[in-house]
Image (cartoon, rainbow, N blue to C red):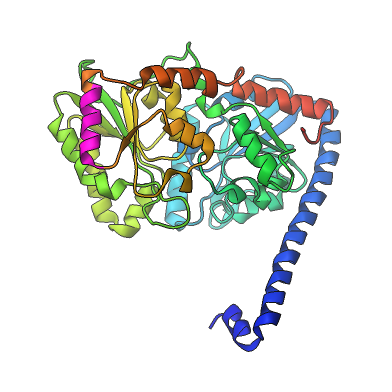
Amino acid sequence: MCLKSFIRKIVPPLIYEWLSAFYKWSHVEKENYTIWRVRNLHKKSMRTLRNKTTIRCIFFALFEEVWKYDRVYELLTNNPRFEALILVCPIVNYGHDNMVDRMERCYNAFKRKGYNVIKAYKGANNYVDVMTELQPDIVFYTNPYQGLIDDRYYITNLKNVLTVYVPYYFGEGIWYQVAYNSLFCNLLWRRYVETADHKGYAKKYARTKGRNVVTTGYPGIEYLIDKNYIPSDSIWKIKNSSLKRVIWAPHHTMEAVGTCHYSCFLQYADFMLELANRYRNKVQFVLKPHPLLRNKLNELWGESKTDIYYSKWEKMDNTSLNEGEYIDLFLTSDAMIHDSGSFIAEYLYTNKPVMRTLNDIPLENMYNPFAIKCLDQYYKAYNEQDVEQFIQNVIDGVDPLKEQRTKFVNEVLMPKGSPSQNIIDDILDSIDNQILYRN
């Protein structure tokens, strides 16, 4: 019997409820004190940085697939006020072997780009001590979850540096307390958000009332909106332009827990392979799974069955598997089918036809008002027939939502200027003018 159950058994109900309420209150008050204390430490850090010649920035990277800081990193490295380094941090919730494999893949991805990158794990339970070895002035987080990253790199252990976070996803869910009022979110010096809608959620739900939140636009879409960017189509096996290019991007949330139960993967896993075979002379497909889908399938199916399934996507003549970055994939595609979270908004920037596979959970039970506005621009799939009709429309060039979608992209989604440049401008302005919080 756990301690909580034992106490509940021996303590009278009214006293137990009082003790429970007191515990919750004291926990919140302890967090509030931590937030207040860190706010004062940020003031001191800003005073130091105003007169510092070079500001040292460390990016905590976990998954290469959800890295959104390419343009931010490039702007920092080209600015004499900054020095930038990427630290690949350990992901600890799926065991040691997975941690080492993920770190190696992430590290190699940044090395291929020529970035300044090191691994946090040195082997034999030896880790980089950030504060003593790297001495950062600003730390950029790529993921907010405690328990995913090793605790030594969590925000509660970095109170004396300025902390920045750009969400790794384009916010679409209704879990406002987690997304905007966690201890992590309230401890941040700056959180840069996608739209005014997202700033509004922070003002409504966060204990800081969103004062550490700045609307800059989403840096993850920089290359999607850059007309001078030339994408590579190397992921596509067949270079014949007469074949349509369709992405299938399934989410990992197959378990019906909480509000996030996006995934329809199990419903369509075999059918999508059947479609690829059926339309092999007209369409080529790319499987773009969520980074955690393989881990979930290993637990559900076993590693052997999971490996066989992924291998089929790699080996068929008109299919491919992409587990890495996706900007070039988006830009060189003709359409996408998915049940992802961030992609709800991101793929719309391509202004290409897109379909959402849906389950029987009402949209308002999973998605915030911004995401529902985005989904209004989508074709919807509730069964296999809907998916196949979408594929047929893509082949035939039929896109009834084109005009409506174009208007939405131009009037609602497009940011003012470059999101990454907006972030750099805010950091410099905040430090130079000692602006702790925005209104």
Q: Quadrant of residue 273?
A: top left
Q: Nearer the viewer, residue 360 or 210?
A: 360
Classify residue 412 by image quadrant.
top right
Residue 185 in the image: above or below residue 408: below
Q: Residue at x 49, y 57 (%)?
A: 93
Of the pair 317 and 216, the residue shown nearer to us: 216
View extreme (bottom): residue: 10
> Residue 157: x and y, percent?
70, 52
Q: Residue at horizontal 58%, vertical 21%?
A: 415
Of residue 134 and residue 309, the one placed in the foreground of this image is: 309
Which residue is pictured at 60% across the width and 24% down the height? 419
Q: Is residue 117 left or right of residue 254?
A: right
Q: Residue furthest top?
A: 228
Residue 385 lies in the magenta-colored region: yes
Q: Specify the principal SS of the magenta part.
A: helix
For residue 18, above or below residue 250: below
Q: Residue at x 84, y 29 (%)?
A: 50
Residue 108 at x, y percent in the picture: 46, 36
Quadrant that contains the C terminus: top right
Highlighted magenta segment, given as a residue range: 383-394
Question: x and y percent of residue 107 in the render?
Answer: 49, 38
Location of residue 319 in the rendering, given as x and y in whole percent from the top left corner: 23, 32
Note whether residue 219 is visible.
yes
Asked if residue 314 shows in the view, the reply is no
Q: Total marks drawn?
A: 0
Residue 238 magenta-drawn? no
Q: Is residue 190 above or below residue 393?
A: below
